[in-house]
Image (tube, rainbow, N blue to C red):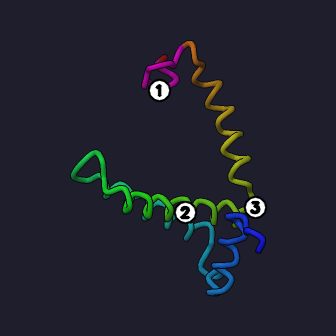
Amino acid sequence: MVALSTYEALRAFVAEREWQQFHSPENLAKSISIEAGELLECFQWGAEGEPDRVRQELADVLTYCLLLADRIGVDADTIVLEKLDITRQKYPVEKSRGRSEKYDQL
């Protein structure tokens, strides 16, 4: 049996249910926000959160992020690495190590 990539598994899951019709970029972006709120809710009353619930909610957030990336035709790994390069320039190690200030405050 050949293992599917995450994108392939998501595409198959969505296709089997004919959910593509509901996955406009707008709807997927809304779903990311909704699921991120549910992830945050895990920490509403304590810093730790229940590990299993955190994992489930984080999976929901990541799933919608990957679905949106796929829908708009971008590779998640590529855009994350591109953004990391931009952020690396804004937060050079010698100025930002151990500090939480925004780049324009360093």
Say which label, 3 or 2, has the lower sequence index. 2
Q: Which mark is residue 29?
A: 2
> Measuring 70% from the left and 46% from the top, which residue is drawn there?
79
Q: Position of residue 87 (x, y in %)?
A: 61, 31
Q: Amino acid at mark 1?
A: Lys
Q: Measuring 56% from the left and 65% from the top, which residue is drawn there?
A: 64
Asked if residue 35 is positioned above or below residue 45 in the image, the reply reads: below
Residue at disc 3, secondary structure: loop
- Callout 1 environment at 10 Å: few (<14), some (14 to 19), or many (20+)? few
Q: Which residue is pictured at 24% across the width and 48% down the height?
A: 46
User: Is 30 a magenta residue?
Assistant: no
Secondary structure category for the residue under label 1 = loop
Q: Is residue 104 above or below residue 28?
A: above
In magenta stretch: residue 96: yes
Q: CA distance from mark 1 to mark 3?
A: 31 Å
**Which quadrant would residue 70 be assigned to in this image?**
bottom right
- Which segment did they paint magenta? 95-105
Cα distance, mark 3 to mark 2?
A: 15 Å
Count residues near mark 3 (Cα–Cα under 10 Å), then give few for <14, some for 14-19, many for 20+.
few
Question: Which residue lies under the disc numbered 3?
Answer: 73
Q: Are marks 2 and 1 in contact (CB under 8 Å)?
A: no
Which quarter of the image is occupied by the N terminus? Answer: bottom right
Mark seen at residue 102: 1
- x, y percent for residue 102: 47, 26
Q: Is residue 43 above or below residue 16?
A: above
